[in-house]
Image (tube, rainbow, N blue to C red):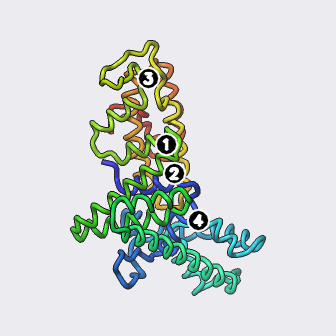
Amino acid sequence: MVAMHTRLLLSISALPTLDAWAPAAMRGGISLVPLGATTTPSHAPHPLRLSAVEPAEDYVGARFDATLQQLLTDARSASVEQAVDVWLDRLDEHFIPSLGERVAAPLQEDNPDELSELMEVLSARSTERFARAKQQLETLLKAGEINKLDAQLVALVKRDELDGGFLYVLFRNMEDARRADDQTRLRLLQHLHTRVQEEMEKRADPGLALLHKLTRTEDEGVRGRILRHYLAPQTSVTLPDGTEMPLNPPAPATVPPLAFANAVEGALDKILAMAVDRAVIEATAEDIRGVAKEAHKVICEEYSQAEIEEFQDALTPVFARALPKRTASGEPKLHDSSS
């Protein structure tokens, strides 16, 4: 079963840009208010964190300082607003709380006014994006009819008005409905999520669309049929009367193995660039690796040894980057029989 965080990060990675994928104020500890609520808790855990752990010392020290200095350097060369717009999607849930502590107790070399201005702009930008995403979801849910909801959603996607913040809001509301056992609301939100995925898949290249389709398909047997449909060469076509006409030679696969490998690599590289907890990135990479292993089985049945090795070789570097512990332990690659 593919975890929710994997679907969220993959969805975010497929957006036209990563801008505002998760508003920074939320990453700083402000949780989404489920629709209909009236207040926003100020110290709720971030949805992508696997546990409520304190940031590691290496983050609070070197990593935070390096990020802060780079952001401030950009702000000095342009403006704080421009720098924040560039950096907002790269900042993880620890950055704003750490910046708040720095504002309250600046170091001797700090410029307190500079830090305060940065904090103010970050808060304003993230609040704007949070409000926009929440309003978009509220508007969709008030459509009244599924057909109207779908039409409004398609219009938003075509205008490139949905960003990662919307997906974040949608996932948090799904979690809230699940906890409250509100099945009616949950079904509506799940329908909306499915439609968002479908519309994104229409706009994605075939390899990435296939990866998304696989990660939102729970049944392993169904995933196998999807993989065979897209990855295997087409040996026949179905005629209008339902009969099968053989193709000799077979038509090329809708998604050749190397194209799928490139899509996996591209998605993982974007996820690796996101400033979220390393444990979440590795858990997401494990889920994607599981899908790649299922694809590998189909490829082994349909392609030559050279093409199989080409697929394996294409994915080895990115999984080594995403899962360094596996590489360090000498664990086999996609063709292993373990895990």
Above or below, comparing residue 211 to residue 180 in the picture:
above
The answer to whether marks 4 and 1 mark residues whose Cβ atoms lie closer than 8 Å is no
**How crowded is the residue under tag 1: few (<14 C-alpha within 10 Å), some, or many (20+)?**
many
| Disc on the earlier residue, 4 or 1 | 4
The numbered dot on residue 119 is none
Q: Secondary structure at mark 3?
A: loop
Instruction: Identify which amino acid the numbered label 4 is placed on.
Output: Arg
What residue is at 39 percent from the left and 65 percent from the top? Answer: 170
Q: Secondary structure at mark 2?
A: loop
The answer to whether marks 1 and 3 mark residues whose Cβ atoms lie closer than 8 Å is no
Instruction: Identify which amino acid the numbered label 1 is placed on.
Output: Leu
Could you say which quadrant of the image residue 128 lies in? bottom right
Q: Residue furthest top?
A: 248
| Residue pointed to by mark 4 | 63
Q: CA distance from mark 2 to mark 3?
A: 26 Å
What residue is at 43 percent from the left and 46 percent from the top? Answer: 212
Instruction: Identify which amino acid the numbered label 2 is placed on.
Output: Ala
Q: In the image, 74: left or right of 94?
A: right
Q: Residue furthest front?
A: 241
Q: Secondary structure at mark 4?
A: helix
**How crowded is the residue under tag 4: few (<14 C-alpha within 10 Å), some, or many (20+)?**
few
